[in-house]
Amino acid sequence: MTEVKVRKFNYSLEGLRGICALTVALAHVQTGMILFPTINQILEYSHFAHLAVLIFFMLSGYVIGVNYPGDHLNKKDYLVKRIFRIYPIYLLVILFCFSFEPDLNLSKILGAIFLLQGWTDRLVTNVVLWSIHYEIIFYILFIFIGKTKKNIAIQAAVCLALGMAVWVFKAVPPIFGGYFCGFAFWLTGLYISKLNPTPNTNSKSALLCLFFLAMVYNHLAPGGVVLNAIGLKNNNIDMVSAADIINMIPCFLIIVEAGNIAINRKLLLALYAAALAFPAMIIGFLFFTGRIHENFRWELSGVLLALAAVLFFVKQRYDMLRNIAWLGGISYSIYIIHWPIGYLMGEIFRPREPWEKALYFILWLTLVLVFSWLLEKKFQRYLKEKFFPHKATAAAIPVVTDNRVKA
């Protein structure tokens, strides 16, 4: 008789995925639509959209690591499942975008269809698709990498070093720096999948602290500040770059805490200290040089950082996000459809009065959620039952527990 690990659905990480999709969507709606000022300000200053995309990369690596834990990989089965998970909904959305894309040309069409947005003209009706291009690259790279915990850590470090080299020497197109640094985040999620969950299901975490901290990082971009401060300024960068290396600390903490993952407590506290220290040094410098009031984002970051520091001592249940796991179940569709719906509505409607703009926002959010649900729960499920009636597609987030059963 042998022992196998039991896999349970991780509702908390699924909820985290939903939060990340929603914060990206809400960050874009304030730039893509004209709401009345109060809502615009709230949406602009209370999101962590860029870090949310980096968390998506980590969660993607985590999901793949949990679903493909061994060294042996059936490459054909793996690629078919990955393509099936991503492409049907993606194709439907880009065909929708083509119908109202201005100045549609062959470069845009081919780039969108073949997921080459990093190398061709991008659709203005769906600017978020760059990250799907990244994901496809990472899925392919997974086939060729070493999959032990040690190898994953080494490969992530190498990717960070190469990403930094692209930033410093500028010898290759900046998208390569994006690939290297983005894959380092993906590998970090893969590494987390190799760690053991905490057996205590009543564990407490400081997730609220980390969410406020993520907003601070989104406003201050501390990685770029540090690189500029040491004379390594670079304005020619891709959507992900060496400036994101410091962002890995809060992203790692958010997934570890939300997923109830066990790591050494001293290491955990050291990571919290580092995550708080980087923005604290920047805010301290701005305060003592009298520049803190030059930018409202800097002032707000000081307040948010103080709240994060206080909330570190106010613990919440690690699974506080489980009640919104349903949002995570439609997060992929939310991510790729929120922009085109907003763009199309902006072309059709021109609300002027505050009440019109409020209804406009409610209608946009309703359409995003409804169409996301239809795409994930009806369209994708229909295809899955038709083509893979007895197979899962590794879409949701399972977790490996310490419980064992005899097999």
Image (tube, rainbow, N blue to C red):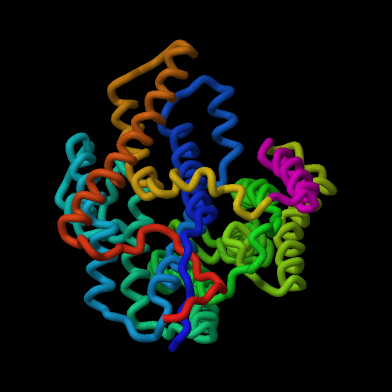
Mark yes or no: residue 283 visible: no
Quadrant location of residue 46? top right
Identify which residue, 380 or 279, lies in the foreground. 380
Identify which residue, 174 or 330, lies in the foreground. 330
* Residue occupying image coordinates x 54% and y 86%: 150
Horizontal side, residue 40 vs residue 106: left or right: right
Quadrant location of residue 171? bottom left
| Coordinates of residue 132 in the picture (x, y in percent) | 34, 57
Task: Point out the stretch of residues depicted in magenta.
Answer: 296-316
Identify which residue, 204 or 84, lies in the foreground. 204
Horizontal side, residue 158 vs residue 75: left or right: right
| Coordinates of residue 175 in the picture (x, y in percent) | 39, 64
Q: Given the current orientation, which residue lies at the most extreme right position?
A: 288
Quadrant location of residue 192? bottom right
* Residue occupying image coordinates x 72% and y 54%: 279
Q: Quadrant of the C terminus?
A: bottom left
| Coordinates of residue 66 in the picture (x, y in percent) | 44, 71
Overall secondary structure of the magenta section: helix
Residue 167 vertical placement versus 339 (above, below): below
Residue 266 vertical placement versus 239 (above, below): below
As for residue 309 lying within the magenta part, the answer is: yes
- Count of picture labels: 0
| Coordinates of residue 142 in the picture (x, y in percent) | 37, 76
* Residue occupying image coordinates x 74% and y 57%: 276
Residue 62 vertical placement versus 310 (above, below): below
Mark yes or no: residue 376 visible: yes
Q: Quadrant of the N terminus?
A: bottom left
Identify which residue, 405 or 364, lies in the foreground. 405
Q: Given the current orientation, which residue lies at the most extreme bottom position?
A: 1
